[in-house]
Image (tube, rainbow, N blue to C red):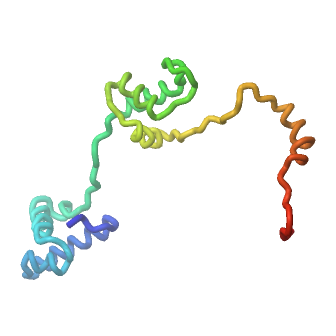
Amino acid sequence: MPRLKGSADLLEDRRQRALALLDSGYSLNEVGRRIGCNASSVMRWRNARRRRGAEGLRVCSSPGRPLKLERRQRRRLVQLLLQGPMRHGYRTNLWTTARIAELIGHEFGVQYHRDHVGRLMHSLNWSPQKPERRALERNDEAIEHWKPKHWPRIKKTLRGWVPT
């Protein structure tokens, strides 16, 4: 049975109630039924209280998997990224998750899947950027001249019975 959702205070209160029932003479199974948990959880809470007192009933956060890159390595990664992709041998000035994963593997010897690089970059307060797709030959002055003169002539107009 997975751990009940709720704040740490709610979970600690639940443990306190369970142990109060246990102290008043109920069996482990009966306390588990009344609280809505397994008897093994009640037994674990009882043993924790015996070993460490009230501190043993405190809710601890689950640390999760340790980070692959240490804090120092993450700072170094940001410095490397700020140098730009062309400095690291890429032909375009665009960081992709695959390129960042390759850089991390080359510099730190740590393998990241490109799908997980996005999470790493988000934790470093970097956001994904899309390059503007514009032709190098683009002439903004000619476009500004063309829009008011030619665009109204070729713009699609409403035909037939259409409410206006």
**Viewer-nearest residue: 13 or 80:** 80
Residue 80 image offset from top left, x and y in percent: 47, 24
**Viewer-nearest residue: 11 or 151:** 151
56 shown above or below 96: below
Spot the residue most to the front.
160
**Viewer-nearest residue: 85 or 161:** 161
Answer with left or right where residue 145 lies relative to residue 92.
right
Answer with left or right where residue 59 lies relative to residue 106.
left
140 shown above or below 48: above
Residue beneath the point at 37% across and 22% down:
106
Answer with left or right where residue 58 lies relative to residue 137.
left
Q: Quadrant of the C terminus?
A: bottom right
Residue beneath the point at 32% across and 29% down:
110
15 shown above or below 140: below
Residue 16 image offset from top left, x and y in percent: 21, 72
Residue 160 image offset from top left, x and y in percent: 86, 65
Residue beneath the point at 43% across and 43% down:
119
Residue beneath the point at 71% across and 29% down:
135
67 shown above or below 18: above
Q: Quadrant of the N terminus?
A: bottom left
Answer with left or right where residue 126 lies relative to residue 141.
left
